[in-house]
Amino acid sequence: MTSIDTLLTRDGEAESCTPELAMPTWTFDPAPGYGPGASMGDVIPVGSPRQGQLPEEYRSASAEELDQRIRAVKQRLGDRAVVLGHYYQRDEIVEHADFIGDSYQLANAALTKPDAEAIFFCGVHFMAETADILTRDDQAVILPNLAAGCSMADMADIDSVTECWEQLEELYGTETDERGRMPILPVTYMNCSAALKGFVGERGGIVCTSSNASTVLEWAFERGQRVLFFPDQHLGRNTAKRMGVPLERMPMWNPRLPLGGNSPKELLDAQVLLWHGFCSVHRRFTVEQIEKARAEYPGVRVLVHPECPMPVVDAADEIGSTDFIRRAVASATEPTTFAIGTEINLVNRLAAEFPQHRIFCLDPVICPCSTMYRIHPGYLAWVMEAFERGEVLNRITVEESVAEPARLALERMLAALPQG
C-alpha cells in the first residue's frame, strides 16, 4: 500500500496543499496554528493546546524502529492499554490501533475496555475529551500530540454560543408550547469542545455524529420547536434538507453579527439555525470534481461525506459518514469505480483494501486532515513508553462540572442509534 507519507515525498508524482506536509510534524508543532494542510488558513484560538518538542531519540528514529518500539511496548502493556485510531489517521498509526472507526464508533469503543488503565486516543482533542467524559476517573485518556485539534470545533466557542443563546431566548422566550416543546433546543456535532457538550446537556439538548444526525434531529424536533445546530453548517443543512426542512427555514448564524446577521422574522420562521462553521477538508470538494469524474469514468459511483457543501452532496450518488462510505465500498459485489469525497487517508486505505474496485479521491490534491496528521508514530511511541515507566504524558481531563452535563448529552447521543 502506498502511504500518504510516500506520496507526499515523491517528486513530481503528486500535488499536495503545501510541500510542508512532507516534513516531520515536530518541525512545526511548536508554532501556533493547525499546521500545514487543509486547515492552514484557519485562525487557531489563543490558548489552544500546544505540543512541546518531542525528545530527540524519537525524532531521529527510523520508521521501522518506531514501529518495532510501539509493537513491543504495546505487547508489554497488554490489557493495561488500548489504542483507538480514527479512520483519518495515517496508516502507520492505524496498524497499531485496537479499534478503528469514526467518532461515533470510537465513543462506543472507549467503553468496551473498562479494565484498561490508559486509552491512547489517536484522533484529535475533542475526541479525547469525549473519551475522558465517558470513561472512569482512574482511566487515563492520552492524546499523543496535544497539537492535534480541530479547526471546525474551534469555530464555535462557549462564549460565542452562550451569547447566541441569550439573544435567542430574548427573542423566543422560554415557555413551552401546547405540545411541551421548548422554543429552541441545542444540538451540537461531536466535533466540539467538552464545554459545548456540557452547554447542550444543561439545556436539554443532545450531541450528534455524522452517523446518527438524522436520528438526533428527529429526537430534537420532538422536544423543541426549533434547533440551534453547531458547529458544522453543512452537516446540519444537508441532514435537515433530506428530512424535508426548506432552505428558507435554515438561516445561518454568524456570531460576529447582531442576531447572527438575521432579522427577527427570519429567526421566528426558522426551524434549524445553522452555525457559521465548516470542515476545511470536506469544503475542498466541488461539483466540478464530480462532473470530471463522471466524464472520465461513466457509471462511476460518487460517495461523499455530509460535511461537504450542499451542491456537492446534491450532485453525489450517496451521502454518509466515514463508516457508511466504508461499508458501501465493502458491500459492492461487482468491480466498481468509486469517486469518494472524504479525507484522503481513508480513501487511500480503501483503495488498498479493495483492489477489485477502482477507488480514488474526488480532490486530486493530496490534503489530509492536517490536525489528525500530527499524530506521528514518534509521539505514540513516546507516550506509551513513558506510561510503561509510570509517567503519564498528555493526559486529557475534563472537569466534573463540565463532564456531568456533557455526559448526559453524550448518553443521549449513544442511545440515538444511526438509521439503517
Image (cartoon, helix red, strand yellow):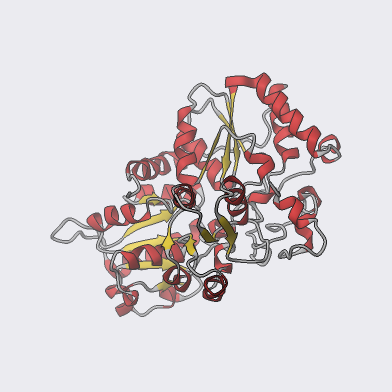
Horizontal and vertical percent position of residue 37: 69, 61
Q: Residue at x 28, y 68 (%)?
A: 244
Task: Between residue 33 and residue 399, name the one nearer to us.
Answer: 33
Which residue is most to the front? 334
Residue 386 in view here: no
Look at 51% across and 60% down and name the residue there: 156
Taking depth in this image into account, of 271 and 310 the one nearest to the observer is 310
Q: Is residue 153 above or below residue 68?
A: below
Q: Residue at image x 80%, y 53%? A: 23
Horizontal and vertical percent for residue 256?
51, 72
Q: Is residue 110 left or right of residue 45?
A: left
Q: Is residue 134 above or below residue 9?
A: above
Of residues 390 and 74, the one drawn nearer to the viewer in this rendering: 74
Q: Quadrant of residue 370?
A: bottom right
Please report the residue visible at 84 percent of the width from the left and 37 percent of the height from the top: 61
Find residue 358 and report its horizontal and vertical position in percent: 57, 57
Please give left or right for residue 173 compared with residue 53 in the image: left
**Looking at the image, which residue sits at the far left?**
178
Q: State the image coordinates of residue 51 (x, y, percent, origin top left).
A: 72, 46
Q: In this rendered view, identify the residue nearer to me: 27 or 182.
A: 27
Residue 172 in view here: yes
Q: How many marks?
A: 0
